[in-house]
Image (spheres, rainbow, N blue to C red):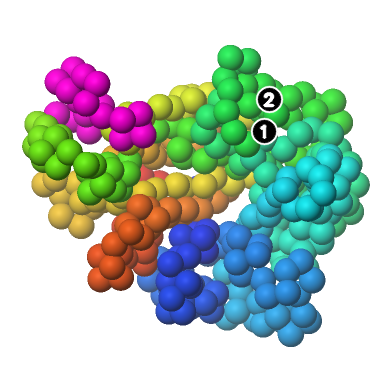
Amino acid sequence: MAIKRGVSFYSYQQEQFFGRMDYHDMAKEMHDNLKCDGVEIISEATVPGYPFPSKEFLADWANTMARYDLKPVALDGFLDPLRFRDHVMNHREAAELLKLELKLAHDMGFTHVRAMTGLPADVAERALDTAEKLNVAIAWEIHLPIPIKPNPAIKGLFCESPGTAVQDTVDFIKKTGTTKVGFIPDMGIFNKAPYIDGIERTLRHMEDKGLAEDIRALWKEVPLSELGTEIDKRYPGKLTQAEAGAFHWKKCADPEDLVEILPYVFSFHGKCHDMVEIPGKPGQYEEPAEDFEKVIQVLKDHNWDGYICTEFEGQRAWQDMGRENLVDEVEQVRRNHEMMRRLIGE
């Protein structure tokens, strides 16, 4: 039983956009530099001809995985409710699309499909026979603002009943006895501070440049987790609602909440936005907004066996800048794996 490291190729979206990396390059980077083997992909971003790839692609994919000794872990699919021009996708149609994702995952060697966040239990039920036959699990992503413990007061995007979505799925698993339905928790649900990249973007675009400089100076004085509260105290009413949001943070789960659902967790999204060097510890890095340390400790304490796949998504906050200012995705992922190796105890 062991925690293993992987990468979501989503982390290299910018490199792919500019034509500097494709899945061959990403696989080589994992093997040569990250020394990890778990692969996660965004289906439409990696698979030409999705959802019906050619035999040539499937053969090349298999050869690439074998060449670099990699293991396909999660295929990220999407149940886009606005896919059709004349109506919102219904649950029956969502299940049929999920079946296509399961077939694709099977053909590419993945162990589970990341379905939409907050997947309704009846959609999973409609696709369950296919999952069982293909031996590919259905896992939906537990993403902010969805809590692990039931909280009916929680409202937000992504699903119909965010406050009870996790418990609804657990009830479904227990009712059916299936081992082919579960979760992919996202590290963002355990936030402990605002994201640095979001702060930087907001400061760049604030109309009141003097206030932006004052906030930057304040940032040097107070802990990152307390920055929003201090801004509210010192500059009440000075920020727009959108600006203020960048300096605040929220979580919807504690790491200990994982214990009850770990039997149903297939993998984790190791979300990170800003891998920065730890003061006084050259070559060691942390994500100040995420509670990786406590989450990994919970996983170790309960002998959880599975992959944490880095999901770097800090590039978008810099895409209002010139290419020379864009963040280095490859370096950020490498830093994330330095941190994970250290916390896991490799």
Is 95 situated above or below 72? above
Q: Residue at the spot x=67%, y=71% of the render?
A: 47
Please tell me whether mark 2 sits on a helix, a strand or a loop: loop
Which secondary structure type mostly characterizes the magenta part of the structure?
helix
Q: Residue at the spot x=14%, y=35% of the render?
A: 211
Q: Is 80 part of what is drawn in magenta?
A: no
Q: Which residue is mark 1?
A: 159
Give x and y (percent) for residue 163.
62, 21
Q: Give the quadrant of residue 92.
A: top right
Q: Are marks 1 and 2 in contact (CB under 8 Å)?
A: yes
Judge the density around disc 2: few (<14), some (14-19), many (≥20) Cα neighbours within 10 Å.
many
Q: Is 231 part of what is drawn in magenta?
A: yes
Residue found farthest to the front: 207
Amino acid at circle 2: Ser
38 with respect to 105 (left or right): left
Q: Residue at the spot x=45%, y=38% of the render?
A: 188
Amino acid at circle 1: Cys
CA separation, marks 1 and 2? 6 Å
Please tell me whether mark 1 sits on a helix, a strand or a loop: loop
Of residue 148 and residue 17, the one placed in the foreground of this image is 17
Residue 161: image tag? 2
278 with respect to 141 (left or right): left
Is residue 259 visible from the viewing direction of this image?
A: no
Q: Give the quadrant of residue 251.
A: top left
